Image: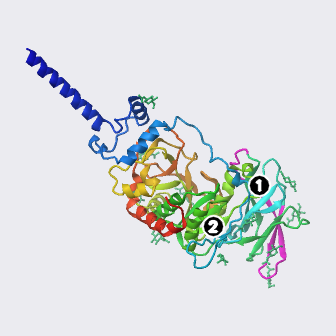
Amino acid sequence: MKVKRIVFLLYITGLCLMFVYWYHGSGSLFSRQNTTAARKLKAILPKTTLPESSKSAKQIPRTTERKIKSIWKKSTLPEKSTSTKQIPWTTDNLKPQVLKSAKFEPGNQCAVNLSWPNGRDEWQILDNNITFVYSAFAVPLENQVKIMGIHRIRIRPKRHYVCWFYNDTQNVSQLQTNGTISLLHDHHGRTYGSMMVTCPLKDNYNWNAVAVSISVIDTPLNYMVLHYPEKQIKRNFTICLSVMHSKYSKVLELIETFEFDKALGANHFVLYHRSSAKQSNVVLNHYIKSGELTLLNYTLPIPPKGIHYFGQITAVNDCVYRSRGISRYVLVVDIDEILIPYQFNNWMSMMDNLTASNPNASAFMFRNTFFDTSMPDDIRRFRLGDKATRYKLKKFLKVWREDFIFGYCNRCKTLVMPEWIDKMAIHRTERIKGDHTPLRVNKSVALLHHYRRYGSSQARVFNAQTRKYSGIVVGRVIKTYEKLKPCVPDL
Ligand SMILES: *[C@@H]1O[C@H](CO)[C@@H](O)[C@H](O)[C@H]1NC(C)=O
Ligand SMILES: *[C@@H]1O[C@H](CO)[C@@H](O)[C@H](O)[C@H]1NC(C)=O
Ligand SMILES: *[C@@H]1O[C@H](CO)[C@@H](O)[C@H](O)[C@H]1NC(C)=O
Ligand SMILES: *[C@@H]1O[C@H](CO)[C@@H](O)[C@H](O)[C@H]1NC(C)=O
Ligand SMILES: *[C@@H]1O[C@H](CO)[C@@H](O)[C@H](O)[C@H]1NC(C)=O
Ligand SMILES: *[C@@H]1O[C@H](CO)[C@@H](O)[C@H](O)[C@H]1NC(C)=O
Ligand SMILES: *[C@@H]1O[C@H](CO)[C@@H](O)[C@H](O)[C@H]1NC(C)=O
Ligand SMILES: *[C@@H]1O[C@H](CO)[C@@H](O)[C@H](O)[C@H]1NC(C)=O
Ligand SMILES: *[C@@H]1O[C@H](CO)[C@@H](O)[C@H](O)[C@H]1NC(C)=O
Ligand SMILES: *[C@@H]1O[C@H](CO)[C@@H](O)[C@H](O)[C@H]1NC(C)=O
Ligand SMILES: *[C@@H]1O[C@H](CO)[C@@H](O)[C@H](O)[C@H]1NC(C)=O
């Protein structure tokens, strides 16, 4: 009897030990953690099928595990958040920055020359403290000139503004026409909002510059190069990266975005520059030199809190008008966003498909989803995991998307054919010409991945669609980074 009992006890103990071993060793991805935390994480990742069997969970490298643990300890996993706050202000935004390469010497490989190689557009005064203008575009087919700017919302625009046209050879105005201001939406209750001045473009003559004033007796306080549509399509996709601000310093994020977009079909980037850190200038300089980046001076004449997101809407309209005739498509995104096609291998084949079945569509809206960057890196079964980890390539490491996909017009971003756009907004088009229409692209075709901290929901879904492109992108990012490395701080 005694022997039997001992054997039975040993048997039970063995089973218990086996259970403990199994539970610790593989039962759950994070099994060594305390159970409260485990429960928390399970709640955060409910019923999501972990892509791997529990066996391979053991293969998580130490560093990843440590990171996961530290994240847990601090319990920084986001609570349900509805925050849509923009990046906080820093005081450096308040002072206009003159971007100069202090240490520029020829032959110095780290020399940076960002002296606006692409143009003379900059913010100028139309009506002091009330209206400012940035750039001017001719629309020959409609005999119009569109001037991009901002206006103090509370003050009703005047009925007429006067456009002054200048000839190539004589720097005196040869013609004045009356124009009007139309305010664009989305000023978010700020003091200033974006606007466009529309003036008739007369005489079918290639005026080379234009100025605007409040009346014919007021001398204009501005003078803008008049941009015409280009005459030859040289690009498939131009990316409008909106306003760079707050001494932007994320070198690798910048390179990753440029190289990833290029792999998907981007041929050119347009960036509106307010401020950046020195190391970012090295990267910008690299892409300017390669001819892939147009950098524009975007030092607003008003304090940034006076306008929504640094006057982004004016920048976006400028970018669309600037790309007419030279780029088939224009995509408006931020540096922390990337449009990932799910059914095609690049943007061009996706667009060929969408345009073939929707011949009248000229704006394509893609839905947005967050990839919370405070989630642990996950490189299980990822061949280039070690490289991605070393170079902190967020778009390949953060593969748990939040289980919420924003609707159309809410954080979604739009890809347009620039010729058809009259007015552009951030998340949609404000006005399209003719009988063209916007198209709401199904989320199974493509999604806009947005890498940021704030949560839209607590549940997570594994999504490694970006890895389809890792074979091309990872190598290119590393190559570019290694080339610039002597001129930027270590990782
Ligand atoms: C387990 O984790 C929770 C929350 O992370 C913490 O409050 C608690 O003190 C932990 N318990 C132990 C025994 O570490
Ligand atoms: C910087 O670039 C501008 C425009 O491309 C050019 O005019 C200028 O000479 C350059 N500066 C130096 C120091 O090379
Ligand atoms: C950028 O434009 C502002 C005017 O809006 C001007 O004061 C500043 O000098 C310009 N910066 C450079 C580097 O050209
Ligand atoms: C413009 O506004 C600022 C502050 O709002 C004020 O200090 C300045 O005097 C104003 N300038 C003119 C010309 O009204
Ligand atoms: C522009 O200037 C040239 C040379 O002075 C002149 O021949 C031409 O007629 C002018 N064009 C207009 C529209 O004024
Ligand atoms: C023409 O005159 C304006 C001022 O009216 C000045 O700002 C601009 O630089 C001049 N352009 C040329 C090419 O001389
Ligand atoms: C422009 O507006 C002014 C003031 O309303 C008016 O006197 C003038 O005739 C207009 N000019 C044109 C060309 O319409
Ligand atoms: C644009 O896309 C076409 C394929 O549709 C390709 O042949 C062409 O090389 C691309 N152009 C550029 C500038 O990338
Ligand atoms: C577009 O792609 C879908 C899915 O791949 C396919 O079913 C459809 O036939 C394509 N349409 C055109 C016009 O190519
Ligand atoms: C597309 O536009 C043309 C006119 O430009 C119109 O005849 C046609 O019905 C439109 N097609 C669709 C599907 O709306
Ligand atoms: C989107 O595509 C999926 C799969 O192709 C389909 O089941 C769904 O009905 C589509 N949704 C809409 C709104 O067209």
Query: Residue 416: image x %, image y %?
Result: 57, 59
Asked whether residue 342 appears in the rendered view, the answer is no
Residue range in magenta is 161-189
Q: How many labels does the image show?
A: 2
Label 1 beta carbon less than 8 Å to ligand 4: no
Amino acid type at image mark 2 = Leu
Above or below for 430 versus 1: below
| Nearest the eye: 450 or 379 | 379
Write the residue at 69% across / 58% down.
314
Write the residue at 48% across / 67% down.
480
Write the residue at 15% across / 24% down.
10
Can you tell which mark lies on residue 313? Answer: none
Write the residue at 11% across / 22% down.
7
Q: Name the residue under label 1.
A: 302
Q: Mark 2 points at which residue?
A: 295
Above or below for 314 versus 138: above
| Nearest the eye: 461 or 215 | 461
Which quarter of the frame holds ligand 2?
A: bottom right
SS for tag 1? loop
Give the side of residue 106 with respect to residue 406, left or right.
right
